[in-house]
Image (tube, rainbow, N blue to C red):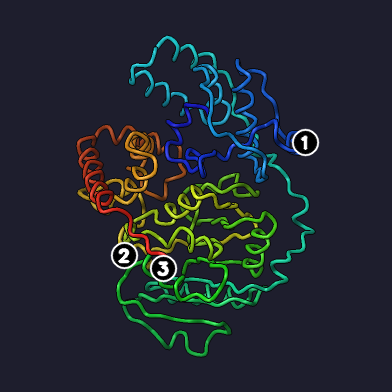
Amino acid sequence: MFEFLKYIQPTHYFALPSKTVYVFPKYTKLPVEVKNQLQSDENYTSENAKLYDLSWQALQLGYIGKAETYSSFENISVNDNYYFLRKYFSAFWSVYVLMIRVLSFKNPIKEFKGFYKSKNIKRTQYLKKPISYDDWVTFESSLIENNPKVSVIIPTLNRYKYLQDVLKDLEQQVYSNFEVIVIDQSDAFKASFYDNTYDLDITVEYQKEKALWLARNRAIQLSKGDLILLFDDDSRVEPNWISNHLKCIDFFNADISSGVSLSVVGDKIPDNYSFFRRSDQLDTGNVLVKKEVFKDIGLFDRQFEKQRMGDGEFGLRAHKNGFLNVSNPYAKRVHLKVGSGGLREMGSWDAFRPRNVFAPRPIPSVLYLYRKYYGNNRAKLELMRTVPSSVMPYKFKGNKALKVVGVFFSILILPLILFQVLKSWRLASVKLNQGSKIEQL
C-alpha cells in the first residue's frame, strides 16, 4: 500500500498477506452503503493513491465484508506518502520517516520537498465516525440458540484473591452452557479453594511447572467445547460477556472474536476499541476461538514460554491462514494487571523493558516473532521504532512527552542499549535455528 507504512508499522498484521492476498478491499468493489461512509481525497497526485486511501479508510473504520481485496500494490510517489502520513498519524512520525530515509541515502531533495509540502496537513479525526452495523442490536443469533459448549480456559499462578472474583463473574453469565478449566501453577496449591464453592462446571489441574503456554495448550487438549474462550486470572467481565462473543462469531461468520481489554495501567484506550473491525491483534486474556482453528494450525508455540507475544504469534498465524478475527467492543474486560503473580513470576511481563540492565532488550521471543514472519530488515525497523521509548517505565507508556525523553535518554546510554539488543538478537537466532515448538491438537 503506502510504502512509508513499513517505517512506522513494520510488523503490523496487515503488512502480511493472508493466503497470498491482503486484507485491504478494493474501493470499486465495496458496497454502496460503505462507499457512502468514506471520504474521497482529491489532494493526492495519483489515482492509485486516492484509491489506496479509501481502502485504508474502509479497513480502519471497520469494514469486515467480502469485497475483493488487493493482491499487490503500485508504487506511490514520495509526496503522496508524506501526505498520507500527515493525514493519519502524528507529525512526529513524518519527521521520523524523513530522518530514516535521508540517512538511508534516499534523494534528499525529493524527501524534503515531499515533507515540506505536507507540513500544513492536519491529522484527520476519521475514527470518530466508524462504519455502523445497525443490524447488530436486533440480530438474533442462531449460534446462541444452538447452545454450543464453550470451554473457558484460565491459567493461574498465585492469584487466588483475584481468581475468586473471576469465577464469581463467570457464575453470573447469561449464557450457561460452558465449562471452566483452570490450570493452577500456584506455589502453594489450594485444592480447597475450588471445593463446593462455585456454581460452575469446573475442572482444575495442578501444573507443577510454571509455564503459561504449556498451561493453555494442556487446557485446550482437555476441553470438551467446540469454542475455546481464553481468559486471564486478573480480569473482570460483565454478565453478557460470553453471549456477546458468540453473537460476534455468528454475526460476522468469524473464526475468532477478540474482546477488547481495558487496562488500568499503560496506554490510553484506543479509539478503535469502540467499534467492530478486522482485528490486528489477539489477546489470550479475552478471546473466543473456534476449536477448528487450533486443529488446523496447531496450538501455541512454546518457543514463547516464560517470555512474550505467544498470543501475538498465534493471531498472526491464524491471519496468514485466512481465519477471520473480529475485534469485538461488546465483549470487553477490565484487565487489572495486578503487581504480583502471573507472568511476572514466570519471566518477563513487558516485551521491551528488561528486568535488569544486562538482560536482553527486547525479550528474545519478540525478535523471534518479528524475524520469523517479517524478516531481519523489518525486525530492525521495529527495533528502531520501539526500543528508544522503552527506556521509560511501563506506567508512562502512553505519555508522548516522556516517549520523546526516552529517545534522547537512549542516545545517552547507547552502548548499553546496543549490548541489550545484540544479546536479544543472538538469543532469537537460537530460537529460529531450533524452529517452532507447535504441537498439533
Which residue is nearer to you in this view: 338 or 246?
Answer: 246
Q: Earlier in the sequence, mark 1 or mark 2?
A: 1
Query: Mark 1 is on which residue type?
Result: Val
Query: Mark 2 is on which residue type?
Result: Met
Q: Are marks 1 and 2 in contact (CB under 8 Å)?
A: no
Q: Is residue 257 left or right of residue 374?
A: right
Is residue 183 among what the camera can see?
A: yes
Give SS at disc 2.
helix
Give SS at disc 3.
helix
Q: Nearer the viewer, mark 2 or mark 3?
A: 3
Q: Earlier in the sequence, mark 1 or mark 3?
A: 1
Crowd tier of the residue under label 2, counting other residues whose Cα lies within 10 Å: few below 14, some 14–19, many 20 or above: some
- Distance from Cα at disc 1 to Cα at disc 2: 51 Å
Residue 364 coordinates in the image, percent (x, y): 29, 50
Question: Label 1: which residue?
Answer: 32
Q: Is residue 293 left or right of residue 46?
A: left
Residue 151 coordinates in the image, percent (x, y): 54, 72
Question: Label 3: which residue?
Answer: 217
Q: Are marks 1 and 3 in contact (CB under 8 Å)?
A: no
Q: Is residue 438 above or below residue 428?
A: below
Query: Mark 3 is on which residue type?
Result: Asn
For the point 50% across and 15% down, which residue is it? 114
Residue 334 coordinates in the image, percent (x, y): 54, 61
Residue 158 coordinates in the image, percent (x, y): 37, 73
Residue farthest to the top?
109
Q: Nearer the viewer, mark 1 or mark 2?
A: 1
Question: Label 2: which residue?
Answer: 346
Which residue is nearer to you in this view: 358 or 319?
Answer: 319
- Distance from Cα at disc 2 to Cα at disc 3: 16 Å
- Distance from Cα at disc 1 to Cα at disc 3: 44 Å
